[in-house]
Image (spheres, rainbow, N blue to C red):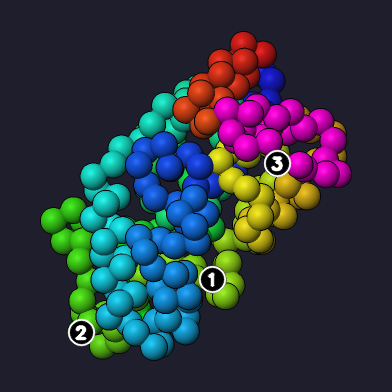
Amino acid sequence: MTNIKKIVVLTGAGISAESGIKTFRESGGLWEEHDINEVATPQAWKENPALVTRFYNERRKQLFSVFPNAAHFALVELEKKYDVQIITQNVDDLHERAGSSKVLHLHGELKKVRSTADEKLIYELTEDNYEVKIGDKCEKGSQLRPHIVWFGEAVPNIVIASKMTEHCDIMIVIGTSLNVYPAAGLLEYAGFNIPKYLIDPNDAPVFGLKNLKKIIAKATVGVPQLVEELMKE
């Protein structure tokens, strides 16, 4: 019996943008008219938790109105032949809703909140109960905050992600500018000689990577195309 090849897929904002989710980099450094320093940093939470809470309530509400796209579904198809692990920089749950079985979130999850006193106390929100207010507390009596890795905070899952990447047979990067670290550094952990694919409509220069094939296309075009090729191998 042959071993099933392992594919690690790193996804960024580009794959979610095609489902209608606004991205920070495509809106002039603003998320819904807010500077990231106002809504996505520990300092912002300290200075104006009500604004931060309201901002994430709005993003959460939008998430419930959008759906996975062709790129998400194509990655699910890959699981019929490969061991596929998705590492995503996105905080939405579109990979899970499409049917992907192994998804690691680097930057947190929008549909979850956690205790400010105990980060292990995490709660999932639903479409009928997606709003969080100042005064909503965990069982230990501390305010709930978005389960998001803000700019300036450590990325706990990066260690797990780097180990996954070290042991993959194929790596695919979709819809990311490769400018956000530490996620962008994951490519450096991939085996020097393994096939690597970068799918993005922008032909950004990438240096020092062997066996890299660029597919200059939107995720909904490039991902199904690549998956079709890989399923034939």
Task: Tell me where residue 46 appears, x and y as whole percent.
Answer: 40, 87
Secondary element under disc 1, as helix, strand or loop, is: loop
Residue occupying image coordinates x 29% and y 73%: 53
> Quick one: 142 or 51, which is closer to the camera?
51
The residue positioned farthest toward the top in the image shown: 232
Query: Residue 5, how many percent across, how many down?
Result: 67, 28
| Quadrant assignment, res 139 | bottom left
Mark 3 element type: loop
Task: Give the answer, above or below, for where 180 lies relative to 4.
Answer: below
Q: Is residue 228 visible?
A: yes
Q: Horizontally, is 172 left or right of 120 in the view?
A: right
- The span picked out in magenta is 196-217
- Residue 57 vs 18, above or below: the answer is below
CA separation in Å, label 1 and label 2: 24 Å
Query: Circle 3: is it few (<14), some (14-19), or many (20+) Cα within 10 Å?
Result: few
Q: Residue at x 20, y 84 (%)?
A: 135
User: At x 69% / y 20%, what residue is drawn?
Assistant: 2
Residue 116, located in which quarter of the rendered image?
bottom left
Residue to which mark 2 is pinned: 135
Dominant SS type (magenta) = loop
Outermost left residue: 128
Res. 48 mark? none
Q: For mark 2, does the 10 Å Cα neighbourhood hold few (<14), some (14 to 19), or many (20 or more) residues?
A: few
* Badge 1: residue crowd in 10 Å (few <14, some 14–19, many ≥20): some
| Vertical side of 186 occupied by 76: above or below | above
Label 2: element kind: loop
Q: Identify which amino acid the numbered label 1 is placed on.
A: Phe
Q: Earlier in the sequence, mark 1 or mark 3?
A: 1
